[in-house]
Image (spheres, coloured by chain):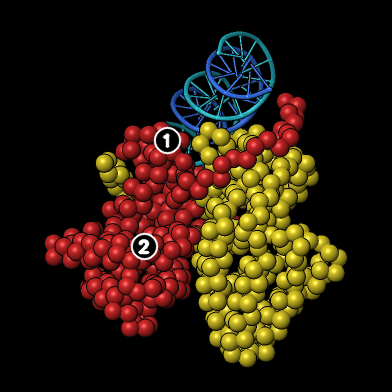
Chain colours: A yellow, B red, C cyan, D blue
Amino acid sequence: MTTASSAKTPRREPRARTGTRTGTRSGAEARIVRSIGEAIADRRLPPGTKLTEESLAEAFGVSRERVRKVLLLLAQRRVVTLIPNRGAFVAKPTPKEAREVFEARHIIERAIMERLERLPRPLPADLLARLRDHGALEDAAERDGDRKAMIRLSGHFHLLLAEFAGNATLSGILTDLIDRSSLAIAAFERRSSHTCSAGDHRRLIAALINNRPGEATALMIDHLDEVERQLDLEAKTDARIDLKAIFADEPETA
Amino acid sequence: MTTASSAKTPRREPRARTGTRTGTRSGAEARIVRSIGEAIADRRLPPGTKLTEESLAEAFGVSRERVRKVLLLLAQRRVVTLIPNRGAFVAKPTPKEAREVFEARHIIERAIMERLERLPRPLPADLLARLRDHGALEDAAERDGDRKAMIRLSGHFHLLLAEFAGNATLSGILTDLIDRSSLAIAAFERRSSHTCSAGDHRRLIAALINNRPGEATALMIDHLDEVERQLDLEAKTDARIDLKAIFADEPETA
DNA sequence: AGCGCATGGATTGTTCACAATTCTGGAGGC
DNA sequence: GCCTCCAGAATTGTGAACAATCCATGCGCT
């Protein structure tokens, strides 16, 4: 094939900024990606929902081309599915894919917990503070029965731990996996069961602070197993929802 | 334009085909992504190389828009870096990022090896066949001193193992990590040493077949350690400090 | 010289119009 | 009644033109 050797004489190297986290540069796009991502995570956009370019463009007040780019990014993250000439849909994971995602989380989050347990004691003050703050938020959401907040906070909890494990690359990978977990949960959750994970998280925080070797890691594994066990890989949920209604009032500032 | 009420009554479900593997639909795009990715992996495109849209468009005989899309995908995979209004460059990982990538590979590939070791014996015939074929290819490349082939084959080896661990999601994650490893190697490799990994791979295959518990996993960890140890990750990135890079960091995202 | 500043050329970013494909709804034949 | 087939409409895909931005070179001034 044609080799891409058309790069001309090397000029100067750009400083490889580690800054941009998502690879998207414009702030507006990042905002839309996050907005749609969160809508999918807390199930305002259930799996299978058609994401019409023009509707989204209107809802966010941007051009269609930009929506197109956003959808491409989300597709790469497996959060939406692009079908040629048919459009974009909120991804609907297969049971196999759901199991794979949870297995991947098992692997990565176990490693994260092991690193956290190996952290020098006492734990950094900011970690403790953020864990405490987070616990309070989750408790409040549980008290209020705010389901969407609980889902969102649950994801944040896992990401918070990943962040303090000190490997941004792993955190990025886990971010995607958590989003896809949300999709899997939305697709396969049983009607009945609802032992919400706030309790698990509380115990996990306590174990992390007390630092009995292996305890926190074991709790994390149990926690992930428990979440996965609550799924019913036979259920098929289907619904469609009006995009504009969902994004009716989007906060201008992130 | 007035708001054309979209997303009407629920219609029909889109066949949630898992078909498109990469998220890119058109075959041409996938081809270009792979082509550029391989060129980066075996260092025909070293880190920092400017990737001008028009040059690429010409080289591949496609429109600039398509190149643009490809670059966006590669940026999402952290293989190229997009700088607003400046263009696309082959990513140049920092030492920190390189360490993170290798740590992530450690975690994932250890898990993969553990799963492979747990496979029922004797190993599937096709796995054995492909391992043998691959070994022959690597031996040949080593004999011929075909450095590019060796790099490519080394990546394929790890992906081959991942594939037979039976988790496509993990394989996908590892694919990205391997590409980024190639970048890290290209950026930080020491001039001198290069005990190429064909030998490591050979021993690993043997251990996998013989199946002394834990041996293959340990070999994989050693292998990854060895590769990383051959890099010079001491922060010698650049003597002069670029002020623009320091202050150019995103003011927008929290 | 060295520094500041304007201009020219090149490259990226955005918008627009149109082509291609699919979906919808109905007419017609069996 | 049910299926097939065929416009019309809606939606996605593509290319080209236009605007914005940046880099480099040269000129004038201190």
Residue at far left of view: B144
The three-letter amino acid code for the residue at tag 2 is: Leu
Viewer-proximal residue among A196 and C18 = A196
Graded by Cα atoms within 10 Å as few (under 14), some (14 to 19) or many (20 or more), the crowding at tag 2 reads some
Q: Position of residue B214 (x, y in %)?
A: 38, 82
Between D25 and B219, the residue placed more toward the observer is B219
Which mark is first along the chain, 2 or 1? Answer: 1
Q: Nearer the viewer, mark 1 or mark 2?
A: 2
Residue located beneath label 2 in the image: B159
Which residue is at 36% across, 62% downward?
A: B159
| Residue that numbered label 1 is attached to | B64
Give the side of residue A165 with respect to residue D22, left or right: right
**Which quarter of the rendered picture does the N terminus of chain A lie within?**
top left
Graded by Cα atoms within 10 Å as few (under 14), some (14 to 19) or many (20 or more), the crowding at tag 1 reads some
Position of residue A91 relative to residue A140, above or below, is: above
**Mark number, residue A236:** none
Whether residue A117 sits left or right of residue B98 in the image: it is: right
Q: Is residue A146 visible?
A: yes
Local SS, label 1 = helix
